[in-house]
Amino acid sequence: GAGALRVLEVGAGAGLHAAHFARALPHTRWQPSDIDPRALRSIAAYVEAAGVPNLLPPILLDVSQGWETWGGTQPATLDLLVSINMMHIAELRCTEGLFKGAGVLLKPGGVLFTYG
């Protein structure tokens, strides 16, 4: 069903991937996030332009901080955690935080998808 799979995208950047994947995967509830205020504004514009109900407004998220600060996401509630083009440009503590958060927030059988 619509929004049946919960997805958190960490470091969504401009928001292009979020808009594309939310439109292509209507059975997901896609939550984009970023630490950069400019990126959050861009993501919000993509959310509005996409006009798809399963694409949520962006949240401020610092992946280097504990998962408890990740927008209220509760343990074992995510089906998919996505990070595209973050790890190769971010500090090591961000990658470490991503993996630690994934270990807590993903459901059993959930997937951490990284690219770039």
Image (tube, helix red, strand yellow):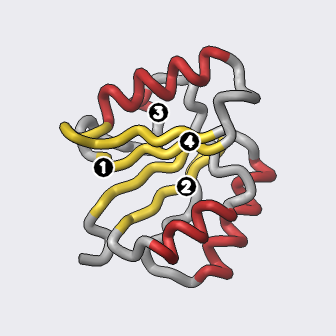
- Front of the two marks 2 and 4: 4
Q: Callout 3: helix, strand or loop?
A: helix
Q: Are marks 2 and 4 in contact (CB under 8 Å)?
A: no
- What residue type is disc 2 on? Pro
Q: Which residue is mark 1?
A: 79
Q: Are marks 2 and 1 in contact (CB under 8 Å)?
A: no
Which tag, 4 or 3, sits closer to the chain's start? 3
Q: Which residue is mark 4?
A: 83
CA gap, disc 2 and disc 3? 15 Å
Report the residue at 71% width, 26% height from top.
Answer: 90
Indicate left or right for 1 with 60 as reference.
left
- What residue type is disc 3 on? Thr
Q: Position of residue 50 (x, y in %)?
A: 61, 80
Q: Which residue is mark 2?
A: 32
- What residue type is disc 1 on? Asp
Which tag, 2 or 1, sits closer to the chain's start? 2
- What residue type is disc 4 on? Ser
Report the residue at 41% width, 21% height from top.
Answer: 100
From the viewer's perspective, is residue 102 above or below residue 82?
above
- Which quadrant would the N terminus be assigned to in this image? bottom left
Report the residue at 19% width, 37% height from top.
Answer: 108
Q: Position of residue 83 (x, y in %)?
A: 56, 42
- Front of the two marks 2 and 1: 1
Q: Are marks 3 and 1 in contact (CB under 8 Å)?
A: no
From the viewer's perspective, is residue 104 above or below residue 29?
above
Which tag, 2 or 3, sits closer to the chain's start? 2
